[in-house]
Image: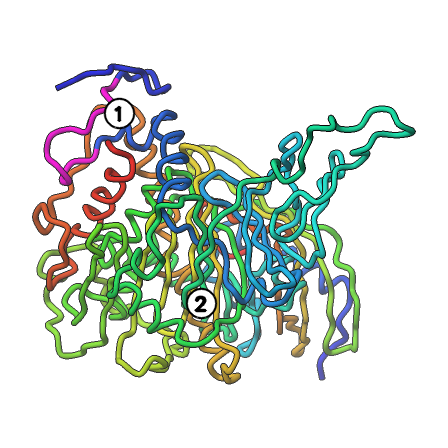
Amino acid sequence: MASAITLERILALQAAYIRCIDNNELEAWPEFFLDRCLYKVTTAENHKNGFEAAIIYADSKGMLIDRIAALREANVYEKQSYRHILGLPNVVKNGGEEAESETPFLIARIMHDGQTDLFATGVYLDTYRAAGNDLKFAKRIVVCDSSRVDTLMALPL
Amino acid sequence: MNINIRTNGTNTEHPLEWPEGALTRVPYWIYQSPEIYAAEQRRVYQGPTWNYLCLEAEVAGPGDYRTTFVGSMPVVVARDFDDEIYAFENRCAHRGALIALDSGGKARDFTCVYHAWNYDLKGNLKAVAFEDGVAGRGGMAKTFCRSDHGPRKLRIAIFCGLVFGSLSDDVPPIEEYLGEEIAGKIRRVLHKPAVVTGRFTQTLPNNWKLYFENVKDTYHASLLHTFFTTFRINRLTQRGGLVISPNGGHHASFSFMDNTSTEHDYSAMGLRSEKEDFGLKDMSLLAGTDEFEDGCTLQILTVFPGFVLQQIQNALAIRQILPQGIEQTALNWTTIGFADDTPEMKTMRLKQGNLAGPAGYVSMEDGCVGGFVQRGIAAAGEERAVLEMGGAETVAEGTRATEASVRGFWKCYRAHMAI
């Protein structure tokens, strides 16, 4: 039987997720999601207007694995890393085995030459599902406040 | 011959004269000079060109408007209550403030926030606040005539649901401007009214021409974008081709899936593009349908000076290229579908959307490579790029291993710039 979703478990998942990306452990990133999931990066304007298209769209863990494989093997971009700073998750729904929250984020991008810029701000709209001791994202909609992306978006948010 | 030695602001002296070598040499000061940038605004964007403004679908009903740009000039596009589309400079005739501040919306008229001068949806000045003064004092001069004042109006041309604008009275009609071949290839994709599915802006750290050249550059596609080649979406060895408009300014490159072509061309050359054992976990990304029923899986089309129509399988998008200074360019993506898309088709477009855009598997590199050039040439204003792949001409050949369409761009650009 799945154990209840608590704020503590949500916080632990959120903290582990950003640590994974910021520490360049991207191969572990898809493991935060269920096999059938939705990961989408969009903008506040598109989200508000009900526009479906996304900067990144994946509806399976396989697609997330493929994105990391492409970043590692195929795509060309300058070395860079992120530093995520999260606000506190606002749990909007908690049904025990499934919960939803909204978590504000701020992401700085650090280029290999040291240039550091505020790359994105926004909110994670999350749906979690508990499977035994595991808590995973069933859905993570990344809503960026700005419609502008500087140069390119290589690493996932 | 060197005449008119001037500085370009980057402390390198250079002659603003095109070097010998016709279209096969491009001097790097062309990407660095404030004088060139200013001349481009006058001669290209405000000259006899058609500039993409928006989709007809984005101003579908009376009162709908969008704000956009023609080069650096802010523009309002609106549909008036006579159901016609109008465009005018987004600049109040009084003190020059923006008339419309939002990216779009619905309006009956526009009122400048500064001194409340009021405009109709055609851009006509309709009212001046306190025009007659207050209690008989102040007010505009008796000789002031509202119809003598107003923002500049653009001519409008609509083709396949695309709204183009021009400040020039000399620009040819849109179909003549595009030419038969390019017009046909736009019709092929936009054969029915498009609907917007999303909008994104990518800020590129380079001069606008470097991006426009990149889109026209059929030579780089399979070499820089390894995702493409690995998954056989586009190979130079695939059956495909290239058309270039007679003036050189517009092009379309296209390819068809062809599993019979030899697979050895890349590996034999030891190029970076060839990766072995690189497979997708979830192949649904590439699941597509032949929606245009001609077997063409990729068509990239440009219209001078800043319009791109993209078909990568079923991922359809319009890209508007706007200069935002000498070394910054806004790339405005409008992803589109059609009103009668089935849920399955919508999902396919969403998934294939991963191929393009700021995080696109096959377009991510285009966001940064222009910046690599801009940074690389920082001290090389007097040096020049080499464009000799496929010869020196601007005519399409049976191959895409050519820079003919990039040379075409320079042919058209130089004609407009008289340079």
Q: Does the stretch in magenta take in A138? A: no
Would residue B330 appear left or right of A32 to someone viewing this image?
left
Q: Is residue B359 visible?
A: no
Segment tinted magenta in the rendering:
B14-26
Name the residue type under label 2: Gly
Q: Where is residue B62 drawn, in percent x and y?
A: 64, 64
* Residue B185 drawn above or below residue A156: below
* Residue B173 drawn above or below residue B258: above
Q: Nearer the viewer, residue B307 or B163?
A: B163
Q: Where is residue B107 drawn, in percent x and y?
A: 70, 56
User: Which residue is identified by label 2?
Assistant: B353
User: Which residue is identified by label 1?
Assistant: B381
Chain letter of disc 1? B
Regarding mark 2 in the picture, which secondary structure is present there?
A: helix
Residue occupying the far right of the picture: B135
Q: Does the stretch in magenta take in B17? A: yes
